[in-house]
Amino acid sequence: MALMILFIFSGSAIFAQQHDNMGGGRATPEDRAKRQTEMMKENLKLTAAQEPKIAAINLKYVKKNDDARKIADTAVQRKTMLTNNTQKDAELKGVLTADQFKSYLRFVEEMKARRRGMQH
C-alpha cells in the first residue's frame, strides 16, 4: 500500500514536482528516476534482471517529461506528456510481468484520481 502513496508511475509528473531535501531545489532527473526505480523495486518486487531495464526507462521518461515541461503551449505540453506516458507504459509492459504491470496500472489510476481530488 506504500506504493499507492509514494510511487508515481504516470508521474514522472509528481516526482518532477518534488523538491530535494537539500534546500528545496529540484532533484536531478537521475535522482527522480532512481526514486521511481527504488519504489518499483520494492513494491513490484523487481528482479535483478528487470531493475536496470526499469531504471533506464524511468530515466528516459523523466528527461522526456522535463523537456515537455519547457513547451510554452500548455495544450501541446499536455499532449506531449500524455504521449510520453503512453510510450513509457508500453516499454514497462515489455519488462514487467503481467501481474506487475497490472499493479502498475492500478497505481496509475489511483494517482490520477488522487490528483483530481486534490485539485477540487
Image (cartoon, rainbow, N blue to C red):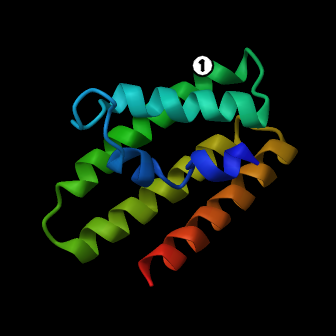
- Which residue type carries mark 1? Pro
Q: Please state the horizontal and vertical placement of residue 82, each as a whole percent of the image.
A: 44, 64
Compared with residue 44, is residue 118 higher up or lower down, i.e. above or below?
below
- Residue visible at 72% across and 29% down? 42
Q: Please state the horizontal and vertical placement of residue 114, each as a whole percent of the image.
A: 57, 69
- Residue visible at 45% across and 85% down? 120
Give residue 105's quadrant in the image.
Answer: bottom right
User: Tag 1's secondary structure?
Assistant: helix
Pick out the residue farthest to the bottom. 120
Q: Please state the horizontal and vertical placement of residue 106, each as a whole percent of the image.
A: 74, 60
Pick out the residue farthest to the right. 99
Q: Of residues 4 and 80, which is closer to you in this image?
A: 4
Give residue 72's quadrant in the image.
Answer: bottom left
Q: Of residues 12 and 60, which is closer to you in this image?
A: 12
Residue matched to label 1: 52
Query: Is residue 14 found left or right of 39 in the rendered image?
Result: left
Query: Is residue 43 found left or right of 91 in the rendered image?
Result: right
